[in-house]
Image (tube, rainbow, N blue to C red):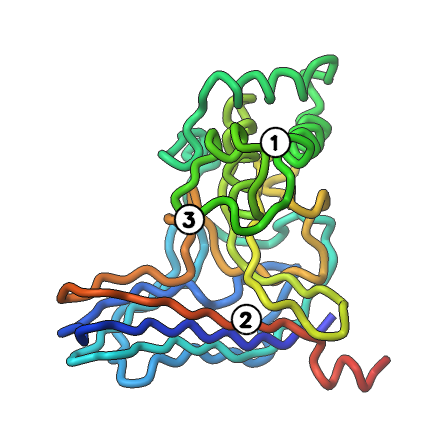
Amino acid sequence: MRLSVSHVTTYRYDPPRRGMVQSLRLTPAVFEGQQAIDWRVDVPGGFRGAAFRDGAGDWVETVSLQGPMPEVAVTVQGEVETRDLSGVLRGHRETVPPVAYLRTTNSTELDPRLRELAGDALEGASLQDRLDQAHRLTSAVRDAIEYLPGRTHTGTSAAEALEQGHGVCQDHTHALISVAIASGIPARYVTGYLFVDDGNGHEASHAWAELHIEGMGWIGFDAANRCCPDDRYIRLGSGHDATYAAPIRGLAEGTGSETLEVAVKVSESSQQQQQQ
């Protein structure tokens, strides 16, 4: 499938900031399931700094800006050819060992309820069949946390989302990471895009988890949608949680109010539609 992405993130400051440094993880990952046909990341007024592929195999760029800045916009435009690999991250090169993803963060910290959820999900499961365990944990998280936007926030932890019983893809992903780690399965947070074939494109970024299954490697599990990523998904980058994997991280010089506006649209490219 060929997908087109338009993603604009706008920060507005009052009073204007004196300067800023940003770290951008906004370039599609390199693996057999996707290939960027055309991809541009623009920050008007920004000065490009270091660019490198980190230990997790993600492309990271740095940008600095000099003020005064009342507004900063980060624009992504591009097309990606995707393939359905049933969630398997085949052909992705990285140097960080899977065992590094057996630690939790504030967002994925385990509590008794999460441990109980993991234990109940794996009751009767084969100790040797890690893939089946991963699917069971994914279903258990989705059953326990109803998809309900507007009730959680960026700082909500997996334990808090489970206690409330509702959340969004970020909360499902944090909870799945938690219960996977509790079960001895390395797990990490993935950011990207998801195309929904509703005729209007999809107006949001997306997040899901990857669990490392020995003998198979990293496999994606989208608890929010009860599936493994297929050719509707575009993978950007990963990390221990939403903060580590954030597509944009920055440090601004100055104080005052900040507002954020995000507009994302994922659609089938015009070339894809002509071929149908």
176 left or right of 269 in image: left
Q: Which mark is residue 264?
A: 2
Query: What residue appears at the point 37 percent right and 63 percent down from the top-left corner?
Result: 248
272 left or right of 233 in image: right
Name the spot of residue 40 as percent of width and height, x first. Answer: 47, 80
| Residue that mark 1 sits on | 214
> Does residue 239 sit above or below 3 in this rendering?
above
Q: Gap in Å between the C-alphas at discs 2 and 1?
A: 35 Å
Q: Residue furthest right?
A: 276
142 left or right of 77 in image: right
Q: Determine which quarter of the picture holds residue 251.
A: bottom left
Amino acid type, callout 1: Glu
Query: What residue appears at the point 52 percent right and 78 percent down from the top-left corner?
Result: 39
Amino acid type, callout 2: Val
Q: Determine which quarter of the picture holds residue 226.
A: top right
Which image quarter is the C terminus in? Answer: bottom right
| Residue that mark 3 sits on | 154
Q: Earlier in the sequence, mark 2 or mark 1?
A: 1
Amino acid type, callout 3: Thr
Which residue is more in the foreground, 94 or 174? 174
Q: Earlier in the sequence, mark 2 or mark 3?
A: 3
Secondary structure beneath disc 1?
Answer: loop
> Looking at the image, do the residues carrying marks 1 and 3 touch, with CB atoms under 8 Å apart?
no
59 left or right of 169 in image: left
